[in-house]
Amino acid sequence: LGLERPTILHDYPASQSALARVRPRDEDGVSGPLVAERFELYVRGIELANGYHELLDAEVLAARNEANNAARLRDGKTPLPGDSRLLSAMREGLPACAGTALGFDRLAMVAFGLESVEQVMAFPIDRA
């Protein structure tokens, strides 16, 4: 992905929503498969950034967390703790928001044409 030019992937399957809002894919807003309002930016085959439109419904998030933990238990993994402060903020009326995470070390790697992220890290694991 992104080998020839920067590429943005968006409208992920609803099953990959994590903390993102979900909506119908079609522009009429009521039909089509459900998609997560998420995106990822790839450059030279490297994921540089990802972001999403924040889910604001506390009950939906709580249900997602319960389903995720049930799947973890089935797989023999430890359940993850819930985030009660986030759920409380949602219930109090968290405003609409979105965010993007950009990997600065990856950006520097791409900008300088380097092959390994360790080439731009001040303290790679082997020198920490």
Image (tube, grey):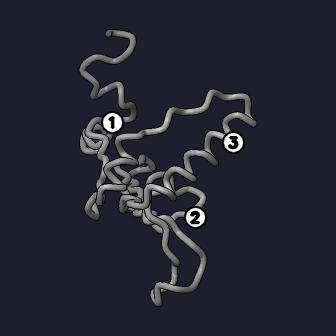
**Quadrant where the C terminus lies?**
top left
Mark drawn on residue 71? 3
Residue 74, by quadrant, is top right
Mark drawn on residue 69? none
Q: Which residue is mark 2?
A: 13
Mark drawn on residue 114? 1
Sort mark 2 into few (<14), some (14-19) or many (20+) by Cα contacts within 10 Å. some
Percent position of residue 73, x then y: 70, 34
Q: Is residue 78 left or right of residue 2?
A: right
Q: Secondary structure at mark 1?
A: loop
Q: Is residue 74 above or below residue 6?
A: above
Q: Is residue 71 left or right of residue 40?
A: right
User: What amino acid does circle 3 point to?
Assistant: Ala
> Which of the two marks, 2 or 3, is nearer to us in this view?
3
Mark 2 and mark 3: span between their CA atoms? 18 Å
- Asked if the residues shown at circle 2 and circle 3 are in contact, with their CB atoms under 8 angstroms apart, the answer is no
Mark 1 and mark 3: span between their CA atoms? 39 Å
Percent position of residue 47, x then y: 41, 48
User: What amino acid does circle 1 point to?
Assistant: Leu
Q: Nearer the viewer, residue 125 or 57?
A: 57
Q: Is residue 46 above or below residue 92?
A: above
| Total marks placed | 3
* First of labels 1, 2 by sequence position: 2
Could you tell me which residue is drawn at 56 percent across and 52 percent down?
64
Percent position of residue 79, x then y: 60, 32
User: What amino acid does circle 2 point to?
Assistant: Pro
Sort mark 1 into few (<14), some (14-19) or many (20+) by Cα contacts within 10 Å. few
Percent position of residue 116, x then y: 39, 31
Q: Secondary structure at mark 3?
A: helix
* First of labels 1, 3 by sequence position: 3
Q: Secondary structure at mark 2?
A: strand
* First of labels 2, 3 by sequence position: 2
